[in-house]
Image: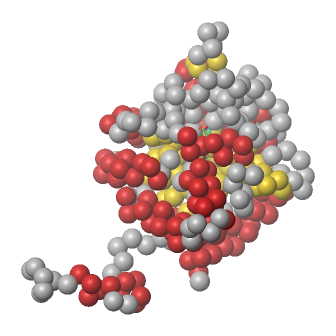
Amino acid sequence: MPFPQERLRRTRQSESWRRLVRETRITPDALIYPLFVVPGRGVRHAVESMPGIFQLSVDEAVKEAKSAAASGVRAVLLFAAPARKDARASDALDPKGLAAQAISAIKESMSDLIVWADVCLCGATDHGHCGHIDAAGRIENDSSVETLAEVALNYARAGADAVAPSDMMDGRVAAIRARLDREGHTRTPIVSYAAKYASAFYGPFREAAESAPAFGDRRSYQMDPANAREALREVVADVAEGADLVIVKPAGPYLDIIRQVRDTVRVPVVAYQVSGEFSLIKAASERGWIDERAAALETLTGMARAGADLIITYFAPQVAAWLRT
Ligand code: PBG
């Protein structure tokens, strides 16, 4: 049925029509809000490169989680930047460590809010890499995996609703599943950062999480941005090892990966709109160069249209509030 019988503009003629035929709808139910926890009390320290985002002490993180929940957000993703940093990542292994404290404090005050705990070594190691370093200065896979499994167990014991390994070591999902199950945490899901690229868009996060590597970069464990088939291998491997959800990260420059992952596996696919993607929109909108609300919603719509079932975004509470108006 070609033109003039077919006129695609018929269903675009009013806001009501457009809403009626909309193919992709964003809902606060599908958003996850990252929180950065630092030591101290009453600390609410602005992250300069991420306007509106703060480093929060545990008490302030509880308040921030409450206010996000009040806007309609149902889940948070916790990152800890402890003061104690050493080769073993001791703070992440400690039942009284910063992350464990934050997890239990938030769960105690809001049992309905879902708390995902980011599992990695970079925030707690003195070198800032996501795994242990061997004598030659290389990132050692298998010993890192053992530590990551212990960290995941620590967070599950503290009450995390899910553990989210973001290190990109091989075999860590299977190791975490086995470790959790052996200790009776059979009900704790694993949200795997399955396709995580070595991206320039993590820059602002490294300020917030104080996790920049002291030497080198992360390209021996995070993926090459040029590779798509390899992302599918990562995702298929993680699902086979027991991942309950998989993350593609970053999101905006990787919409093709989100789509291919959605078409390849059956577990929920999570897109992570990372710090740099957030900061770009914030910076341009602060200069009056872009409409923040429209741009933010458009990026999230693109991710959902590409196949993301859930989205981790620093805009989460803001978007939840916008969607109510
Ligand atoms: C640490 C981690 C990073 C992010 C999440 N977990 C940074 C990195 O790998 O260097 C990035 C998140 C963001 O930029 O918003 N493993």
User: Is 29 situated above or below 16?
Assistant: above
* Position of the N terminus by quadrant: bottom left
Can you tell which quarter of the image residue 51 is in? bottom right
User: Is 100 situated above or below 75?
Assistant: above
Q: Residue 267: x, y in percent?
A: 40, 51
User: Is 118 situated above or below 306?
Assistant: above
Can you tell which quarter of the image residue 186 is in? top right
Q: Would residue 177 be visible to someone looking at this image? A: no
The image quadrant in which ligand 1 is located: top right
Find the residue positioned furthest to the right: 41
Q: Nearer the viewer, residue 183 or 23?
A: 23
Can you tell which quarter of the image residue 142 is in? top right
Q: Would residue 288 be visible to someone looking at this image? A: yes
Find the residue positioned furthest to the top: 135
Q: Residue at x 68, y 68 (%)?
A: 69
Residue 119 is left or right of residue 175, and the answer is right
Q: Residue at x 63, y 35 (%)?
A: 120
